[in-house]
Amino acid sequence: MTDDHDAICTNFAVVRQFDDLDRVVAIRDTISALNHSDVTRADVDRGLETPLTTREAAALFTCLQKNGAATQSATDERGFWAYTFEVDPLEVDRVLTQQAAVIASDGRSPQTGKDEVVEFVATLPGGFEPTSARVRSIPDIASTIRNQVFNADSSVRIANPYFDPSLELVSDLASLPRRGVETQLLTRETADEEGDTRTTLNKMWDLIDEDNRDNFEVRDLYRWDESQGSQAFATHAKIVIVDCRVCYVGSANLTDTSLSTNFEFGVVVEGDIVEDAATVFDEVFEYSYPVDLPI
Amino acid sequence: MADSEMKRGLAQVMYRFGPESLFDYGRRGLSMKVSRWETNKISSLDANYVAEQIATHASSFRNDDEDPWVDLTVDDVDFRRPNRVVGSLYPLTMYCQNRSCHRVVSKKEPSHFVYTNGECPECSDELRQLAFVLVHDCGNMMSINPQPCSNPDHGYDHIYLNKQNINDPLSWHFYCGECGDFCGNMSKRCTKCHKERVYFRPIASNSVYYSQGDVLVNLPIDQRYSDDIEYGESWARILMAAHLGDLDDVVEEEGKTYEELGRMTTDERDAKRREKQIEDLKEEVGAEQVEKMIESGVDIEDVFDVAEDTIKGSTREEVVEENRERVKLPSQRGGDSDVDQAYSTLSHELFTYLRSTQGYEGNLDATDGMERQPTPLSLDGLLEQEDFLESNPEAEVYPEKLQKVNIASAWVVDNLPLLNYTFGFTRDRPERSRTDLQPFPHPRGEDSTPVYVDQTPSEAIVLQVDRSAIIEWLDEKGALRGVERPDTDDESDLKEWFLENVDTNELRDHYSPIEDDLTREVYTLLHSMSHALMRTASGQCGLDSNSISEYVMPSVPAIFLYASSTEHFSLGGMHTLFKTRIHPWVDETIADVQQCVYDPVCEHEDGACHACLHMSEVACESANGNLDRRYLVGGDRGRIPAFWESGYV
Ligand SMILES: [Zn+2]
Ligand SMILES: [Zn+2]
Ligand SMILES: [Zn+2]
Ligand SMILES: [Zn+2]
């Protein structure tokens, strides 16, 4: 840390991530008011109306660290944003005041909110050789879901009718509750003794340690109409909603063929509209039948 | 019996369903032997290098002095890619599962069972395969068959299985139902080597078949030039020169590829130079004039003052000569007869490293078959992307974080071409020195030894270790006595030092000890680092820990951690790790390596055991040899200095 309290910041991670001047000031005041020097994201959240997002937390601590106002003092397997930092309150005041000044002079209007971002994703059929660069460059569904899931911070909602228990993505999903991420899974026919869904759910259950099993909730949406001899209703949606922030919707099941050799297509949406998807999911989830694990 | 179609990933098939292996056929409760593979011939691979690797592997088996392994060269090998597995019913002895019957039906061909309709000829109950085979460490596998009854009228017609003591198959035997004659038991003398009596194994036992093969990185060479490239020393020296930065001008300014440099001779360069001179002259004095001069036989260089460097560009001879002056390999100095092998290993390492970190130097669109070239993204390049930093603000601190473990540069590489190959199998036991390595039968009955290969794109993280940090550490450890220290401020001097002091020949066979002290120190340091990082990487990127493999290049020095998973959809894990998880990865690695549950025993003995640094054999390139945690964190009462900064908390 430096003794030079007039030093000019060289890193502007905060400016790049926050465009609300008041929010940066609130963070600064929160940290200054703490009577201890070890600071975590949770400490900052207590002083804010809306808690920090993962990106914001990462930007804040990067900026403080790069400008000599903080040093990493304890690690956390969840990631950088969950680390503990030893801060120098005077330095924090200097750094965040400068960042706030830059935001102010930038004239950016607070709380504009970013526009929705929409991107297509696909699994391309096995053996198929795309001729155009555009097709070649379309992101792969499996990696997209995987990356989203790894960035999850507080919640993940998944709707998916069919599973492959051997799929590695399944263990990735099981790692969510382990990391403290609230994970809700909507599927079907969990009672089917021969079915892969049952095997998969039990496997996920096994992978989650007892302390974190509360973070994993499964519901079943499937009813057979005896009188008609046909399916009355069932879920067939394939959705992954991460932190109410980003949402994948597409055709692929979480199976080997869907994620490696089928032609499957989908979109990834980011922005406020994702909250609509979460609302729909939540209502349907509520309507579905709770599943007791292990089955 | 129906042929079994290839549905699983090819790499997995190659490992588990090699020719002559045994497997359970689905839910039908049948076991089958892979009788052969249908294949296509493969030509586009670094055949010399792969053949050398196979010869090295083969040399540690008991029958290394026998055909086809003795003096195996590329000419003895036929590279093929499997596209279909053909299996047939095995073993060929069935018995009636009705407990009061146990009638035995044994046939010579699987098709002969068609007439039985799967039913006992005696009581029509279901026939079941005898779930045991005989295997010997010479590689032989035999069916357990009854002998005919000594009464020629009975022959094989009334054989039954005596399973009196159901829990002790050793006591089971065949007998004739007519006269009660003994017709054989569950063992027999090996029919191939005739040496020993062989006892049964359950079909599901591991020891029935051990596949022998490996994975290596196999970058394609530009096939347009490959015939003209002089391999061996010349190719190795061109790549060394490129690595040392001596060819930066020709590669960058003139867009030359290593392959082009590897083939350009002085004559060719002079011809090109003359062509260029003529073009320049035509511009200056007019085409007609120049044509006339040439026709009349005037030497244009006599008439005009032509600049020598109208065509820049080094020729193969120049580059090789210059590099020969500059770099003396350890095997060269010792008058080692294996110096050719050193050139071959070094070429493979340097070519892989250069292309994986710098990409292909030429124009990919103009080149057929080069789509398998790796595409690297450096950490520096990633940090220049504004939108990336916006979504991953902590990435700005990655370089500092990596510096804590002395990693100077890092890349994530897409499309890294992996070559999976299998060259034979052993039975009965896994130890190389106690078994015979069996070659596969040739699928077309030819004389050559078939080697099955599969090429798949993968992804890797490449870590270049801080060269000057290694020198400082070696010096502190006292390992530099009698060795000249390089100028640690000069990258190219440092690079040269590693080429001149690490003996790659010592590392060719990962099953024998490294005798050269300095090479062993450097390799142990890098290998321990590689394992420490591999063990924690899996948790960070979601890949199973056996799905990450290593390729340690001590002469660069660099570490490749690549996804060797056979499941194509699992790609992306290394990217996730590189882009978003460097912090927890490095921190967890540093913390993890400090202690082992078997400390203080582990620390005082080898500094590595299955609880701390060991990985499964598939993931490790050298069977967990040359590993020591103390190299990273310090130990042995101060005699081993710590390579890693540990005071991060
Ligand atoms: Zn019978
Ligand atoms: Zn008889
Ligand atoms: Zn240990
Ligand atoms: Zn290893």
Image (cartoon, coloured by chain):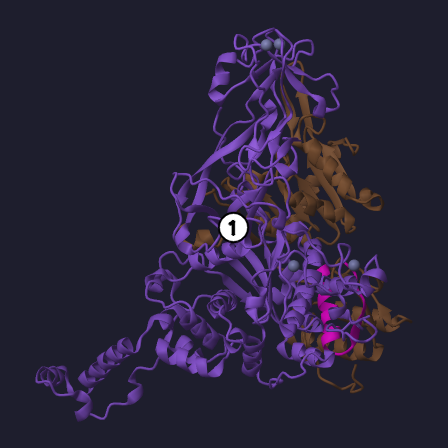
Chain colours: A brown, B purple
Which element is circle 1 on? Answer: strand
Closer to the camera, B451 or B393? B451
- Residue at point 79%, 64% (across, down): B591
Label 1 CA crowd tier, 10 Å (few <14, some 14–19, many 20+): many
Asked if residue B481 is positioned above or below residue B355 in the image, the reply reads: below
Asked whether residue B558 is in view, the answer is yes
Asked if residue B18 is positioned above or below residue A77 in the image, the reply reads: above
Asked whether residue A107 is in view, the answer is no
On screen, residue B404 versus residue B23, left or right, reads right
Would you name the residue on which mark 1 appears? Answer: B420
Q: Quadrant of residue B164?
A: top right
Asked if residue A177 is positioned above or below residue B296 in the image, the reply reads: above
Closer to the camera, A180 or B588? B588
Pinpoint residue B290: horizontal percent, then vertical percent: 13, 84
A258 part of magenta stretch? no
Pinpoint residue B545: horizontal percent, then vertical percent: 67, 52
Closer to the camera, B138 or B202? B138
Pinpoint residue B533: horizontal percent, then vertical percent: 69, 62
Q: Quadrant of the N terminus of chain A?
A: bottom right
Q: Quadrant of residue B134?
A: top right
Q: Quadrant of the C terminus of chain A?
A: top right
A73 part of magenta stretch? yes
Q: Quadrant of ligand 1?
A: top right
Q: Which residues are magenta?
A: A54-77
Subunit under mark 1: B
